[in-house]
Amino acid sequence: QVQLVESGGGLVQAGGSLRLSCAASGRTFSSYGMGWFRQAPGKEREFVAAISGTFSTYYADSVKDRFASSRNNFKKNVYLQMNSLKPEDTAVYYCASNTRKTPTTVAAAEYWGQGTQVTVSS
C-alpha cells in the first residue's frame, strides 16, 4: 500500500506560479513511477505530467514548457512546478503512483492522493 499526500495548491492570478508537492510512503519509492493528474468541474480526470524512477519526464501537450515535474527520492517527494498559469489550469490536482511503471494514463495509476485545489483567476 502506498499513501500519497499532496500540498501546495491555492489561488493564483493568471501568469503566476505554484509548486505542488506530493509526499509518498513506501520502502522502494525510488523505483515508483509518479504522475500528476487534474480534474476540472464537469470534466474527466486527465494526465498532466509524470516522472519515472529513472527521472524521465512526460507532459501533456497543454502544459509542456510551462510545468516541470521533479522528485527527491531521499525525501520520498515528487513535485510539480507550474509556471505561466492560465485560468484553464484550474482543477483539483492529484498525485498518483505505480510501483511497476510510469503512470501516464488514469488507468495506469495504482494509488491516488486526496487532491489539492488549484484556482487560477483571470
Image: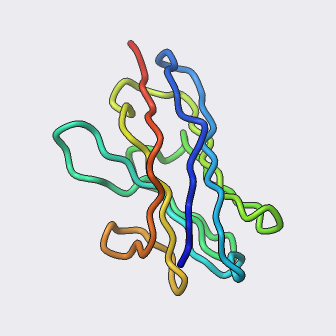
Give the vertical position of 77 relative to 55 (above or below). Answer: above
Image quadrant assignment for residue 65: top right
- Quick one: quadrant of the C terminus? top left
Give the vertical position of 36 relative to 33 (above or below). Answer: above
Q: Nearer the viewer, residue 41 or 57?
A: 41
**Residue 75 at x, y = what percent?**
79, 61
Image quadrant assignment for residue 106: bottom left
Q: Horizontal placement of 120 versus 97: left or right?
A: left
Q: Nearer the viewer, residue 52 or 32?
A: 32
**Residue 10 at x, y = what percent?**
52, 27
- In the image, what residue occupies the spot 50% across and 63% down? 35
Question: Which residue extends farthest bottom?
Answer: 100
**Residue 55 at x, y = what percent?**
68, 70
Question: Which residue extends farthest left?
Answer: 42
- In the image, what residue occupies the spot 57% across and 21% down? 16
Rendered image coloring scheme: rainbow
- In the image, what residue occupies the spot 36% across and 24% down? 87
